[in-house]
Amino acid sequence: MTATTSRLARPLKPRRILDSKTEPINGHKGVPLGDGSQLLSMRMAICQALHEEMTRDGTIVVMGEEVAEYNGAYKVTKGLLADFGPKRVIDTPITESGFTGLAVGAAMQGLRPVIEYMSWNFSMVAFDQIISNASKMSYMTGGMFSIPLVMRGPNGAGPRVSSQHSHAMEAIYAHFPGLIVVSPSTPYDAKGLMKTALRQQNPVCFLENEMLYNAEQEIPLDEYLIPFGVGDLKREGTDCTIVAFSRSVIWAMEAAEELAKQGVSCEVVDPRTVKPLDVDLIVESVRKTNRCVVVEECYRTGGLGAEISALLMEHAFDDLDAPVERVTTTENPMPYAANLEHETLPKPHRIIAAVKKACYR
Amino acid sequence: MDASSVMLTVDPVAVANEIGRERLLAMYRRMHRIRRFEEQAELAYKARKIAGFLHLYIGQEAVATGFFDHLDLTRDTTVTSYRCHAQAILSDLPLTELMAELYGKVTGNVRGKGGSMHFFSKERGLLGGHGIVGGQIPVGTGAAFAAKYKGTGGVSVTFLGDGASPQGTFHESLNMAGLWNLPAIYIIENNQYGMGTACTRAVAVGDIAAAKAPGYGMESITYDGLDLFASWKAGQQAVAIARGNRPVLVEAKTYRYRGHSVSDLALYRTKEELERYKALDPIERVKVAMITAGWHDEKADEALYEAVCEEVAESIRFAEESPEPPMSELYRHVYAEATSR
């Protein structure tokens, strides 16, 4: 086990070669590349982390809607039932509040449940159990009980699924003390962070993204863990810092690519965990670039951009040469129409405009 | 209380003989400890030594007492609502740490971080003390799930009020317990009011357990919750069902003498109604039964009463003298201190 300290991103592979090669195989088995690495998609990376940790820890149970016999609505839990059986991989009824609370009670009694929300949108049905029970249990019992619970599933906008299936929950859950909020953008990060989540004692909101499940990356065959609160530089640059999370990192990278052609050098900071947040890495980058754009799929009001802007005021006020810009989901429920959806999300064209504004160009 | 055709019928003398003198006397003493503790807590609240909410169990003592007598707290678990003092006392937690918690002292049960609604014990399987109506029902279901997963043979007892039965968590939990044959006991302590709203104005059926249990494929038991003998018998039956990995829904028809919380004057009910129930007092009934059986007398009762009062007084002294939490406690335990296990 090595905790990664490298802040350089491994390049994402846009090719789609895995589906055909791995369809009959368990979801956790990547394609060995012969150089100590393997090719994994995001969904396989998460599945591999679950599989490895379930193998070493018999208290881990995976439950949720369609996670077992159906192999997961998005196939993230593919093959787990076959390898670990129905005692540990459990299809639940459609009962988010019920199975979340059940997981809290089971965690209090020595199990380590992993629950899947088919979409984080449905976690709102379980909100009371997540907040009133999971997040507060350690504190309100004076440390007597802890809740080693991983809540996971796709977060953020799916493809054209409109108002009720497109929420991004980072800011909402990060608001509450007691929760850890993870929002990875790459398979490498997702695997290392999931393994960390499965070895600690606090409730974790593990926010995946449906649109990234097919993203492929070469990652090591050797075991590694990524600690919470350690961000990653996805691209180095000198003119402007872009802080982004999850799918927004992909858009930020695209924007940075285009901006480079126009002579603007962007540094892309991926904090990887929203809570705890790697404030040092963000501040360090802004001290270098003196400008910052925050990109997120949450709404603007009370969002991550608001939080990071305030943190920069506190920690890097004298280093800023321009106001911090925020590129967020616009303040409307997600529309179905393709053109409106496109404009609602923090896509590269909006990031490019924000960077130019921050750079007075 | 309305006569109900589904009510468990018990012969108090026969049940008393089954329980036996020592065990019955022990339960009687526990009921006294619950009531005397709460009476003093109420006084301390009125003297502004205790703040926040204070939901009293006075009148309902027979319900939890009868059930706890059948539990093995090395493997069984309990969980309840914010009306949790009785369950903590029946879990054998020292009255000193419970009173200190009400006083918000660092020597309290949860270091002064929970107050009246959040009593817990890891050693004795008390999973709270929960402040959101119905929020504890899935937690108790999870404890039953864990007991079955680990094969401990333990059962999970979830206490809830009549006011929690319309919550979605009730339906969701009982469905899972029935579906997966969990060793779970759910006890609706029907004290007839959800805060100030009569149960008849909030729940569509009269006999909640009898009406709803079949919908989850489980058995039900309904009994007179003011009668310790009925409660003990109901507990015996319920625990036997749950030990066989089957869930059961229980309804105890009971009554609380005080308002929903100490600040509630209970103007939604008549004095006559309250007096009618006080005449059926669960503690007094046990006393009479024991004296009639020749197992107890007034002199011994006085001694028991005095001893319990002294124990409660000691808890007050302890709470008064204990220090408040140091400021180092403010951020402590927001996250668990152990990072792995």
Image (cartoon, rainbow, N blue to C red):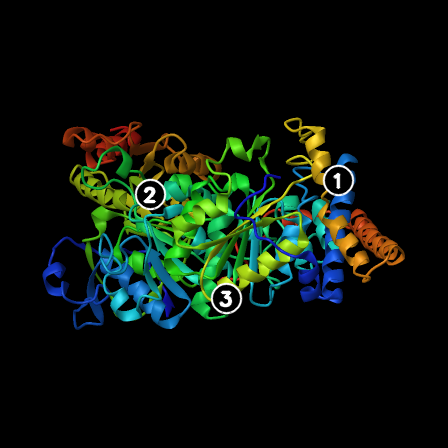
Comparing A253 with B267, the one in front is B267
Comparing B11 with B85, the one in front is B11
Q: Secondary structure at mark 1?
A: helix
Q: Residues within 10 Å of mark 2 (few under 14, many from 20)?
A: some
Picture layout, residue B18 above or below residue A104: below
Quadrant where the N terminus of chain B lies? Answer: top right
Picture layout, residue B320 above or below residue A28: above
- On the image, the x and y values in percent for residue A60 come to 39, 65
Residue at mark 2: chain? A
* Mark carried by residue B42: 1
- C-alpha span from label 3 to label 1: 37 Å
Question: Could you tell me which residue is drawn at 48 percent across and 47 percent down?
Answer: B210
Q: Earlier in the sequence, mark 3 or mark 1?
A: 1
Q: Residues within 10 Å of mark 3 (few under 14, many from 20)?
A: some
Q: Please give the residue where the numbered disc 2 appears in the rendered image.
A: A122
Q: Please give the residue where the numbered disc 3 appears in the rendered image.
A: B243
Q: Secondary structure at mark 3?
A: helix
Question: Could you tell me which residue is drawn at 12 percent across and 56 percent down?
Answer: A16
- On the image, the x and y values in percent for residue B24 come to 73, 61
Q: Is residue A356 visible?
A: yes
Amino acid marked by disc 3: Arg
Amino acid marked by disc 1: Glu
Q: Nearer the viewer, mark 3 or mark 2?
A: 3
Residue at mark 3: chain? B
In the image: residue B178, left or right of residue A213: right
Q: Quadrant of residue B195?
A: top right
Amino acid marked by disc 2: Phe
In the image: residue B124, left or right of residue A39: right
Q: Are marks 3 and 1 on the same chain?
A: yes
Residue at mark 1: chain? B
Q: Are marks 2 and 1 on the same chain?
A: no
Q: Nearer the viewer, mark 2 or mark 1?
A: 1
